[in-house]
Image (cartoon, grey):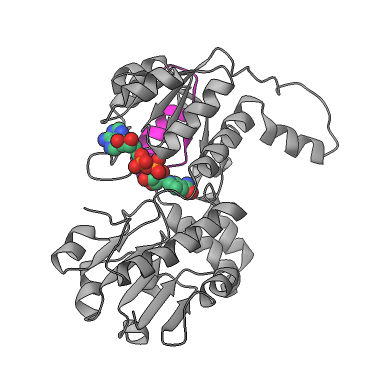
Amino acid sequence: MKYIAFFETTKQEEHFLRKKFGKGVSVQFFPEKIQDVPVQKFAKTDAISVFIYSVVTKELFAKLKNLKLIATRSTGFNHIDVKNAAKRGITVMNVPYYGENTVAEHTFALILSLSRNIHKAYVRTLRNDFSLAGLQGFDLKGKTLGVIGGGSIGLHVIKMARGFGLKVLVYDVRQNHFLAETLDFSYVPLTDLLQHSDIISLHCPLNEQTHHLLNIENIKQVKKGALFINTARGDLIEARALHYALNNGIFAGAGLDVFEGEELVKEENQMLTRNVPVEKLQALLQKSILLRMENVIITPHMAFDSVEAVERILQTTVDNIVAFEHGAPKYVVKG
Ligand code: NAI
């Protein structure tokens, strides 16, 4: 690799990555998403590395004649046109295992915040109000957690759930009965999971099959008063179904690290640095009804973001680039 361009990098990430490449390699860093950087600035590049807000399209491949490798610094790769990359002989690599425990821990941060009303208590005590009214929570022990997607992250969530004394139901298109027996959970059809879970947590990838996996039709099957947790991808649940469920008591609360249209909010946040009047920013944010619901906790797609996990992401990305150069790429993704 002679030219490598990294997008969506912070200063700390740049500092870490710069040290990993020798003098013969030209490494460029752009804090912006790839679609926000003029292509001529990185036209010679033979490898690019992006995070999840960069949209990597076939139109871009046509402009980057030397491109051989896309190394996404994420597990999910739905932001990359993998099929067309393959047609052009471009390899796509991801970081499949950096943060199973990290995302699972954030999942439980959201579950526990909702089950014990931590978010409401925090706001109240800031106002010097130490009353208990309306803050009573519920025990996790003895309740049922429904995990949709029992892969790397899902399995960590299941292990933690068993520690809390939760019963676990799993819906997955692939099943591992040895793990089900060892960790003491049951695979069930999606309908059964929706009907019997007190907490539903999403951990499957976003793809053509899973887009709007939860929708306005099947949302009505959910056990009334369940908690909904999404640390996977926003588009797994139809926004209209999420609003319907929250407005009609189907979901008693939601913990969302991701939600449909989160990229727009992200852009609004970035406007802070572009001298946009605060009133405009507030007006934009208020648009989002979800932000105004007191039984909804939103975190800004940060489930992956622990010191340890980010280091693992960067190191694996470097390893991916080196392995590709040596003709032994390990974490290649297929469309
Ligand atoms: P994984 O590939 O190990 O597990 C995904 C599981 O979902 C697999 O068991 C798979 O069989 C299952 N699955 C696939 N299609 C399905 C379908 N149609 N219905 C039900 N299950 C299906 O992936 P991993 O590492 O557990 O990550 C899951 C997702 O979490 C990623 O795809 C990514 O979108 C998201 N993620 C979010 C992060 C965040 O910061 N919020 C960080 C890392 C991942």
Residue 198 rendering spot, x and y as whole percentages: 48, 19
Using the image as rendered, state which of residue 274 and residue 258 is in the foreground: 258
Q: Which residues are magenta?
A: 222-246
Residue drawn at (32%, 81%), measured in percent from left and top?
Answer: 45
* Vertical position of residue 22 compared to residue 104: above or below: below
Residue 155 occupies which quadrant of the picture?
A: top left
Residue 31 rendering spot, x and y as whole percentages: 50, 73
Q: Is residue 118 left or right of residue 313?
A: right
Q: Is residue 140 magenta?
A: no
Is residue 36 something that shows in the picture? yes
Q: Is residue 233 magenta?
A: yes
Picture quarter with ligand 1? top left
* Vertical position of residue 160 compared to residue 331: above or below: above
Residue drawn at (86%, 37%), measured in percent from left and top?
Answer: 128
* Vertical position of residue 183 compared to residue 281: above or below: above
Residue 67 rendering spot, x and y as whole percentages: 26, 76
Residue 205 occupies which quadrant of the picture?
A: top left
